[in-house]
Amino acid sequence: MLETLKDLEQRYLWDRNWSDAPAWQRVGIGVARTLLLVVRDVIGGDLTLRAMSLVYTTLLSLVPLLALSFSILKGFGVQNQLNDTLRTALEPLGEQKAIELTENLITFVNNMNVGVLGAVGLIFLIYTVVSLMQKIEAAFNHVWRIHIPRTFGERFTTFISAITIGPLLIFAAIALTGTVMSTTVMSRLQEIPMVGSLIETAARLLPFGLVIIAFTFLYAFIPNTRVQLKAALVGGAVAGVLWELLSFGFASYASGTSNYQLVYATFATAIFFMIWLYLNWMILLIGASIAFYRQHPAIVATGLKEIHFSAEQSSAYALSLLTKIGRRYYEKLAPLSLDELASGYHLPVHVLETSLSRLVNVGILAEVEGARPQYVPGIPFDTTSVAEVLERLTTFQPANTYAPPLIAEPNIEAIIHANRTAREEALAGLTLKQLALAAGSAVSTTEEPEVEPVDQADGASG
């Protein structure tokens, strides 16, 4: 039966062409494919390992993070909201457990004395908070197949913004909502039957909306790549629904587990809290995975098959990248970033990352450091021939690798030499500058992949 189900899945979900099907069928197939790929990600184990790592780091950094947030909120006079918000967030653990954990956490925060900790203790507390942010970024980058981390300066500004501004905005929104709901005008509106029902419904949906906005914000800005807002919103909406369902289900489960209190005694609350943290991190990573697949439907359509360039395609994409980057350089426009190039080819970032890294390693391109790596010519394009580029790419040997010597075969050496000579003669000294600026005849000497070019306006805005 399992083999039959796999055969049906392959036949109807992946092999069949649904491009001519009605819109509702295409949407349904896309959703089914995405769900199946997310299930594969979870079963594969990478997401669970990341979630477990985040649980451990959260336990270490939770009290310092709350202390830092408390000190910031205290400056704005809204620190009293921390107790109620924590208790509301922990309600799925059960009313008694939520109250107990909230009281313990607030006690830890109030008892934290930086003067007693000393310099070493303070550094350790700051490190635990930064470590949590780094692990969150690493987990999101893993989901998005990104291997290039942020620079230290960008990490510092991003983490400080998330740690300081994030809690302030959340508590400010909660306080503002409470203030608005308690006004005289709002009280009078609630007395109107229809309007009062709408206001009550909106007030109940507000926390759910805030959760979706928070998840969307994380999916849009934490990964070290350009995330489309609609993709982040889809991931945030799905994660928000799962989070609400988990809260309801976990609360129902926790209310009927009095026997665990007898077995684990005082450890029961801590165990339930760790399970709750793990499930929350899993939902957050699942939402990030959904956002990734929403932004890259081409990967979904392949069934998560990894894109692999043939030798001919590798050369073609390398020349195409050099053409776009060289054209931007000679037109004196802002250099293209990895995100912009990937968007122009409608490919995931990690696919082009290999090609660009190879061009940088052979010295043809250079990276411009910044918020996002940008690429400019690394050698004079007006004196570098296309034949030389192809030769460098063909003979490229990665660092820290060893190429065994080729057994001397006169016939093979003659073939390689003839191929090199024929390529140089066919290209007739065509330079990279000519390739980048030519409008017709010169470009025809190389086969560029059939992809949409990067929009000039988009690139300039980057």
Image (spheres, rainbow, N blue to C red):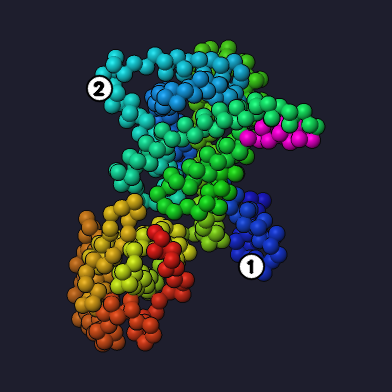
316 w.r.t. 140: above or below: below
Question: Is residue 178 visible in the rendered structure shown here?
Answer: yes
Q: Which residue does the image show at 35% across and 34% down from the upper left? A: 130
Residue 116: quarter of image:
top left
Residue at the extreme right of the image, as rendered: 193
| Magenta part of the chain | 194-206
Q: Main secondary structure of the magenta part?
A: helix
Q: Which residue does the image show at 79% across and 31% down from the upper left? A: 192
Per the rendering, the mark at residue 19 is 1
Task: Check disc 2: other Cα within 10 Å, few if <14, some if 14-19, many if 20+.
Answer: few
Pair 1/2: label in front:
2
The amino acid type found where label 2 is placed reads: Ala
Q: Which residue does the image show at 30% across and 26% down from the upper left? A: 124
Q: Position of residue 111 (x, y in %)?
A: 39, 14
Q: Earlier in the sequence, mark 1 or mark 2?
A: 1
Q: Position of residue 53 (x, y in %)?
A: 42, 34
375 relative position to 68: left or right: left
389 w.r.t. 199: above or below: below
89 relative position to 255: left or right: left
Q: Position of residue 167 (x, y in %)?
A: 47, 31
Task: Check disc 1: other Cα within 10 Å, few if <14, some if 14-19, many if 20+.
Answer: few
- Dot 1 falls on a residue whose secondary structure is loop
The amino acid type found where label 1 is placed reads: Ser
- Dot 2 falls on a residue whose secondary structure is helix
40 vs 181, nearest the viewer:
181
Q: Which residue does the image show at 69% across and 30% down from the upper left? A: 185
Q: Which residue is mark 2?
A: 119
Question: Is residue 411 visible in the rendered structure shown here?
Answer: no
